[in-house]
């Protein structure tokens, strides 16, 4: 029986993230501190009753509903979709133990998948299924589970989970014993075994509880704010439980108006103070209308920008704060604007042009896309089951966009996350001998255009005229050959490594790994080999002299991308701005409908950028 239950937990927790990195007020100490504090609270009867009714209606317990709400809060607050928390369980699942005095409590590891931005009701289904599975396998002692799973140990945080949710029945009226007056005393100690714990007690007149938190990480003000967000989230869930997680409110209407009022008063007071001075152009500090934070505590990529109020218009804010955007794109590589309610092609078009008025056409494309507005495109239309490898946009050509914008109109039902990776970090992760090889030899991209196989040459070059294609290739330094009726082969040798024109940093900037034949699914690759020579594949990558790039070298490049990658799930209305030379992007497979828009701006030509020549000294990586 124990072996069966251990097998369940090993499967359930395979690949779980080792750390839930909540935004904190101080860096995590090298050795975990158990110094803590607590914040008590009470929820009114109306919220308790509504939560009970929602639970009853959806076939869940109050514990499941509160857990789903708590994990939603953690998901929104930390930006993670794979949420793992611990929970106490009485462990009296046998009749012989019910009347026995003693302490049998065990800890369960509750892992929930919040990907795909589901509705709260859909999440509650997931939590119910997950919780019932955990209950059915509750007999494995937690210490035994840690021993068997052998998670990577770090003295700065506890294994398997760092956040705990506990639910208990609170006897508000005390315990009635003959000849004794018994009452429950609150005994909050200044100790916290975990980063954060939420204790929720159900009683006749409502719900009461307390937050226990590590004072080595969090200030009291942050926990007070987190609790206010939790209450607002509960209200939002109860008002419309069918709402997607990303659209649920975390800030109350009164708080939003108060923040907006404070911003207006600040500007008004500033005007009174300086109205006697000579007028000059000033910029409103971006912090007065937005707040910024890291998506992951351990990574500078991307910077998340959120509005302090629903009344903040992203396009207007961006137009007035271009310096903020430019500075942080150079520093972080990407900005994820979340909560601004960008909902349509027109909204996205206005925002992109507010940052960069001259948008670009998608010339010489490598993937199928549709133009849905003036220079606004769909993201790649390759099949949903296919991985789109991390790449810098159009880095296989002699000209590429400086900025790339993405907007999520509709997140996928499942999957469809976007990985992004710093080109600076990829460069640093590669073996020096590999880097030197590509600096010296560069990359040759070979494309074979055949009717009915991948993109046609008419689509890529935007014309049916062969002479126009030939003229374009000559101007772009592309070697071309008509290999048969309506068949075209092109070759172009491009950069592999560049020096950023503004920061002077070295960046890995090519698509050798994405064009290489090994990037094809094995079944597709074998099917093509059965029909043609590898030289005739729709696309391939070689060293610049035409010699094959070894599969092992391509795998080393992919491993560097994997190690540098930061992945996030889209929420409806998200806008992602990327500095294209500094950050690569990709796409995970998905199911269901997914609509992400793309725009590009500010063309950069290879002639205007320094390539790193063989043996040239490398500047140090800028730390952010």
Image: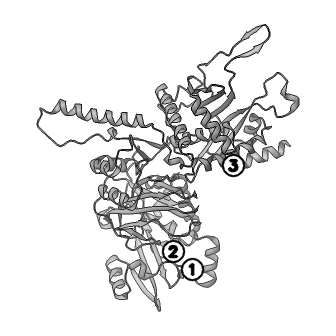
- Distance of mark 2 from mark 1, alpha carbons? 8 Å
Label 3: state its secondary structure: loop
Is residue 291 in sight in this rendering? yes
Q: Is residue 383 left or right of residue 523?
A: left
Q: What residue is drawn where x is 35% and y is 50%?
A: 314
Task: Give the residue number, with chain letter if any, for mark 1.
Answer: 534
Q: What residue is drawn where x is 50% and y is 70%?
A: 515
Q: Residue furthest top?
A: 179
- Distance of mark 3 from mark 1, alpha carbons? 38 Å
Is residue 580 in sight in this rendering? no
Q: What residue is drawn where x is 61% and y is 32%?
A: 48
For the residues bearing labels 2 and 3, Cβ distance under 8 angstroms: no
Pointer 3 local density, CA inside 10 Å: few below 14, some 14–19, many at least 20: few
The answer to which quarter of the image holds residue 476 is bottom left
Relative to 29, does residue 421 appear above or below in the rendering? Answer: below
Question: How far across and how far down the image is residue 181, in percent?
Answer: 73, 9
Query: Which numbered disc, 2 or 1, marks the residue that appears first in the sequence?
Result: 1
Relative to 543, does residue 199 appear above or below in the rendering? Answer: above
Pointer 1 local density, CA inside 10 Å: few below 14, some 14–19, many at least 20: some
């Amino acid at each position: 029986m124990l072996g069966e239950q251990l097998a369940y937990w090993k499967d359930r927790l395979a690949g779980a993230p080792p750390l839930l990195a909540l935004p904190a007020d101080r860096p995590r100490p090298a050795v975990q501190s158990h110094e803590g504090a607590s914040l008590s609270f009470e929820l009114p009867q109306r919220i308790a009753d509504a939560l009970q009714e929602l639970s009853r209606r959806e076939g869940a317990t109050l514990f499941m509903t509160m857990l789903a709400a708590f994990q939603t809060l953690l998901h929104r607050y930390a930006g993670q979709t794979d949420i793992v928390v611990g929970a106490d369980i009485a462990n009296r699942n046998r009749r012989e133990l019910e009347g026995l005095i003693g302490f049998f409590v065990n800890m369960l590891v509750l892992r929930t998948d919040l990907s795909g931005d589901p509705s709260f009701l859909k999440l509650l289904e997931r939590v119910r299924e997950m919780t019932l599975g955990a209950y059915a396998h509750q007999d494995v002692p937690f210490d035994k589970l840690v021993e068997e799973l052998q998670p990577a140990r770090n003295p700065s945080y506890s294994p398997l989970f760092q956040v705990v949710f506990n639910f208990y029945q609170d006897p508000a009226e005390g315990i009635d014993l003959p000849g004794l007056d018994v009452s429950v005393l609150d005994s909050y100690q200044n100790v916290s075994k975990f980063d954060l714990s939420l204790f929720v007690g159900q009683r006749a007149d409502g719900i009461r509880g307390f937050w226990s938190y590590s004072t080595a990480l969090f200030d009291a003000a942050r926990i007070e704010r987190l609790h206010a967000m939790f209450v607002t989230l509960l209200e939002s869930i109860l008002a419309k439980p069918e709402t997607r997680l990303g659209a649920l409110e975390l800030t109350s209407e009164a708080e939003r108006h108060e923040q907006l009022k404070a911003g207006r008063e600040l500007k008004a007071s500033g005007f009174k103070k300086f109205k006697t001075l000579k007028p000059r152009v000033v910029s409103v500090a971006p912090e007065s209308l937005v707040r910024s934070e890291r998506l992951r505590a351990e990574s500078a990529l991307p910077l998340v920008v959120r509005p302090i109020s629903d009344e903040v218009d992203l396009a207007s804010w961006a137009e007035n704060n271009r310096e903020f955007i430019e500075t942080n794109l150079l520093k972080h590589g990407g900005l994820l604007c979340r909560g601004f309610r960008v909902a349509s092609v027109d909204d996205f078009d206005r925002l992109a042009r507010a940052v960069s008025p001259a948008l670009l056409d998608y010339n010489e494309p490598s993937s199928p896309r549709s133009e849905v507005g003036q220079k606004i495109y769909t993201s790649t239309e390759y099949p949903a089951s296919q991985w789109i490898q991390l790449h810098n946009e159009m880095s296989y050509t002699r000209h590429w966009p400086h900025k790339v914008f993405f907007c999520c109109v509709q997140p996928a039902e499942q999957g469809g996350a976007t990985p992004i990776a710093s080109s600076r970090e990829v460069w640093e992760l590669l073996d020096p001998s590999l880097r030197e090889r590509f600096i010296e030899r560069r990359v040759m991209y070979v494309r074979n255009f055949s009717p009915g196989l991948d993109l046609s040459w008419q689509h890529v070059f935007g014309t049916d005229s062969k002479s126009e294609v030939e003229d374009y290739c000559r101007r772009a330094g592309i070697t071309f050959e008509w290999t048969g009726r309506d068949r075209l082969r092109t070759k172009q040798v491009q950069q592999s490594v560049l020096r950023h024109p503004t920061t002077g940093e070295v960046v890995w900037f090519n698509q050798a790994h994405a064009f290489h034949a090994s990037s094809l699914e094995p079944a597709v690759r074998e099917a093509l080999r059965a029909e043609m020579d590898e030289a005739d594949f729709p696309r391939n990558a070689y060293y610049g002299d035409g010699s094959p790039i070894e599969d092992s070298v391509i795998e080393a490049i992919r491993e560097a991308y994997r190690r540098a990658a930061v992945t996030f799930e889209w929420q409806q209305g998200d806008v992602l701005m990327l500095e294209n030379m500094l950050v690569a992007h990709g796409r995970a497979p998905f199911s269901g409908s997914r609509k992400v828009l793309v725009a590009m701006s500010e063309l950069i030509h290879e002639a205007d950028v320094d390539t790193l020549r063989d043996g040239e000294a490398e500047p140090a990586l800028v730390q952010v």
